[in-house]
Amino acid sequence: MIVHLPTVKQLQYLVALRRFGHFGRAADACFVTQSTLSAGLRELETLLGLTLVERTRRVVRFTALGQKITDKAIKVLRETEELAEMARAQGRPLHGELRMGVIPTIAPFLLPTMLPRVREQWPELKLYLREETSTAACEALHRGQLDCVLLAVPFACGDVDSAPLFDDPLYIAYPEGEAPASAAVTAAEIDESRLLLLEDGHCLKDHALSACNRPELRAHAAMMGTSLHTLVQMVDNGLGVTFVPGMAIEAGILSGTGVEARPLRSDQPYRRIALIWRRSSPRETEFLLLATALRRIAADLVPDVSAAATVAPALEPLDS
């Protein structure tokens, strides 16, 4: 008996439609026409003898079995990509394409100075960067859209391995003339009625509140910001106070403002920056090599941050 199996292309069409919920956008993501994608999905349904997607003029709705098959397709595509990565990486570490996610509270402050050093060390590495919030980056990692992520931990990111890079100290930013005379600020000194925080989805907010050990600050946040730069401008206008990571201060985020910053004093006044990847990835050796280099580069570029480890640390899960 001849069994006709779905093609990788058909599975890619199915996963793209699930992701975008729209035939046109899914087709664009797959670099094909909408008619080609639609025809490929109909061929897949005919092959399986099932209806995977209910089509109407306004809505794309997956059937219950279609949802389950798409979940399996995501895993199959990820395994297929890892097979290719395994062959490509054999004997040539950090060669070819690498898709790295970076969260917004790291990307603009570390990458401009870090990337030239990475390119110098591995000229054959084609590094594709994607800036995402922590939640979105973890989802993209497990969908196989990213190979690794520069993330601040701890953060619940599922079944991943990690290599810590360095600890990034946290500061409290005040409007000009409002900073306390003390060299550092304790959590008890923060006025929650004037606290400005990042929107949900940014792990910096959770790390800062955890460092303060004051969960009630979350409920009293006066305003949410979409970026650190926005929050700094709000502080500069006298609207409140906020948390700023050390790497952002080193990169000059306070330049041109009257904002004054004081280090946070607590049991853990920092966030830990780490490189994470899927535990099933065949490129673990490459990621450990990259992490060692990033750790060394960060120590040179950001002198006020402390190395998370002097040698390559044992891997630790981040799903707790």
Image (tube, helix red, strand yellow):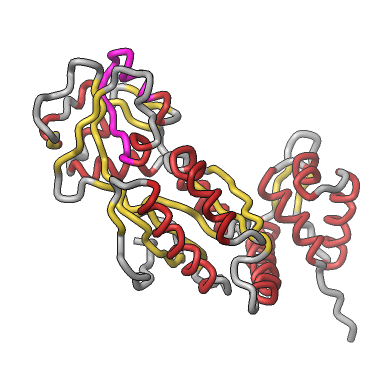
Q: Residue furthest bottom?
A: 1
Q: In the rendering, at what x and y percent does residue 207 appear?
A: 30, 45
Q: Could you tell whether 203 is left or right of 284 in the image?
A: left
Q: Residue furthest top?
A: 237
The residue under the point 68% across, 50% down is: 18
Q: Residue 7 falls in which quadrant of the image? A: bottom right
Q: Dividing the picture into quarters, in which one does residue 100 lie?
A: bottom right
- Asked whether 241 falls inside the magenta stretch, the response is yes
Up-down: is 200 above or below 153?
above
Please give the name of the residue rendered at 85% of the width and 79% of the height, measured from the top-left corner: 3
Left or right placement of residue 133 versus residue 27 in this view: left
**Residue at 26% over, 27% down:** 173
Residue 41 falls within the magenta-colored stretch = no
304 vs 145: above or below: above
Query: Horizontal and vertical percent for residue 261?
Result: 24, 29
Along the line of sight, the residue nearer the viewer: 56 or 200: 200
* Location of residue 286 (image quadrant): bottom right
| Residue 253 shows up from this direction | yes
Could you tell me how many numbered marks the image carries?
A: 0
The magenta stretch spans which residues? Answer: 231-246
Residue 201 visible to the viewer: no
Residue at 66% x, 56% y is 126
Residue 133: x and y in percent read 48, 42
Quadrant, the N terminus: bottom right
Give the percent coordinates (x, y) of residue 313.
34, 70
Q: Is residue 297 left or right of residue 240?
A: right
Relative height, residue 119 to residue 107 (above, below): below
Q: Quadrant of the C terminus?
A: bottom left
